Image: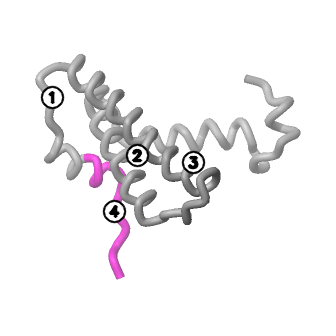
Amino acid sequence: MTSLMKMDEYQQLALRTASHRESKEKVLTYTALGLNGESGEVAEIIKKAFYHGHPLDKEALRKELGDVLWYLAVMADGLGLSLECIARENIEKLRARYPEGFSSAHSLHRPE
């Protein structure tokens, strides 16, 4: 059994293969475009499964989601942010927004 990897550990390992880090502008444009491209590949797999009759390819989705995570990790680093910090703050925001868990009623009537 494989031990779980912490998000900041993943981020540091991902940075070993990051290029286009000459400037903040290059990091952000490269990773924003990469995130968009990889997210599009995820959407394409879903589209083919639900609208073109293909089987849902979970293996391909896992690989594409890994690519999304890689671009996110590199972008976060370019902004001086850690993945663990981003994840923790997101969970705190969601807990404040939906203290009892998600519901459509809370979603429709939640304070911003």
**Marks 4, 3: nearer the viewer:** 3
Q: Earlier in the sequence, mark 3 or mark 2?
A: 3
Q: Earlier in the sequence, mark 2 or mark 1?
A: 1
The residue tagged 2 is 84
The residue tagged 4 is 5
The residue tagged 3 is 47
The location of residue 11, given as percent across then percent down, is 28, 47
Q: Could you say which quadrant of the image residue 30 lies in?
A: top left
Q: Is residue 58 above or below residue 15?
A: below
Describe residue 101's horizontal placement relative to residue 108 as left or right: left
- Under mark 4, the amino acid is Met
The location of residue 36, given as percent across then percent down, is 41, 33
Q: Secondary structure at mark 2?
A: helix
Q: Is residue 3 above or below residue 18?
A: below
Q: Earlier in the sequence, mark 1 or mark 4?
A: 4
The location of residue 15, given as percent across then percent down, is 19, 43
Q: How has the structure been colored for display?
A: one colour
